[in-house]
Image (tube, rainbow, N blue to C red):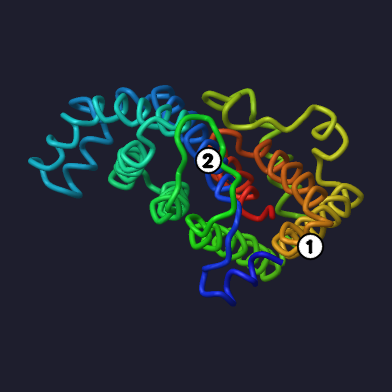
Amino acid sequence: MWFFDALASGFQHPTDPGRLQQFRIVFGAVLTARFVLSFGQGGWTRLVPGSLTLHLTEQRFGPTRARLLASVYRPALVIRMIAAVALAAGLVPRLSLLVVLAGAAMEMLYLKSPNAVRYTLLTGACLLVAGDLGHGLSIEHTPSTANTWARCLLVLITTDIYWNSAWQKLRSDQFRSGLYLAQWVHTYSQVRDQLPHRRGQYAVPAIVRRHMGNLTHHEIRLWRLIAAIVIAAELALPAALLIPQTTPYAIAAGIMMHTAFSCLKPRQLVTFSGLTTGTYFSFIT
């Protein structure tokens, strides 16, 4: 198995550098989508004079720094989007990556819960330490050690994300009982028409709402089964992704799982789901 060979050799084991280049393309595409979405739903007017966000920013950083942030905010939105497109296309990829990461880090200054930003910076840092990001949309498959260290980092990060998530779910009685998922789907089914920008907030299929959108004992038992499947999948996926014989099935299962997650929070999870499934390239031999 290449991962353990790489660890044993001090990351001098040749691997396919194209796998990380494929992740670079996915990373740029996902961040392009995130940055495009940031223009909508009030994002373009976030720090305009008189806005609540600007007022809170002034309280946090002081008037001078808040005004400086407000003055560069809109140009930064445009520049980082252009850089994300350039990164996906392989145009001056390292410079584009630096601009993308700086543009993403800017969100730490005003988002209330910037977990997606932290994950973006973490996976983006793996690209920064890579030796060969490639150029254009061409993929280099000649084995080398240029990206071995970066690929191992991505594997470790994804494994930690999955196992930590499974551990938190195992510790949650409400999640394991199925009640959390049942209540989430039921509540959002009731209020979805009143949600602002509801297409970006909730996308559970009608068949699921119809047959599993209430809080009956039967439906809660179904959600309990689903909760158990999710925990088992998060525990098993990292190993299954690394084993060549099970890799295709693990990729399919992971994509299905993240698609289901995204139905619960489409806009909020576009970054997490996109980048996590993108890291699957790093697992492939």
Q: Secondary structure at mark 1?
A: helix
Residue at image coords 70%, 39%: 259
Mark 1 neighbour class, 10 Å CA radius: few under 14, some 14 to 19, many 20 or more: some
Residue 94 image-quadrant placement: top left
Q: Point out residue 124 in the picture as x, y percentages from the top left corner.
A: 43, 49
Whether residue 251 is situated above or below residue 71 in the rendered picture: below
Residue at image coords 84%, 40%: 212
Identify residue for label 1. Answer: 232
Image quadrant holding the C terminus, namely bottom right
Give the left or right position of residue 33, taking residue 178 as reference. left
Q: Point out residue 1 in the picture as x, y percentages from the top left corner.
A: 71, 67
- Which mark sits nearer the N-terminus, 1 or 2? 1
Give the left or right position of residue 184, taking residue 150 as reference. right
Q: Point out residue 58 in the picture as x, y percentages from the top left corner.
A: 16, 42
Residue at image coords 56%, 75%: 9
Q: Please identify the residue farthest to the bottom as the structure is shown.
A: 8
Whether residue 9 is situated above or below residue 218 in the rendered picture: below
Residue 64 image-quadrant placement: top left
Give the left or right position of residue 98, taking residue 133 as reference. left
Residue at image coords 74%, 46%: 257
Identify residue for label 2. Answer: 271
Q: Please identify the residue farthest to the right as the structure is shown.
A: 218
Q: Please identify the residue farthest to the front as the structure is shown.
A: 142
Q: Which amino acid type corresponds to the residue marked 2 in the rendered image?
A: Thr
Q: Secondary structure at mark 2?
A: helix
Q: Point out residue 34 in the picture as x, y percentages from the top left corner.
A: 47, 32
Residue 198 image-quadrant placement: top right
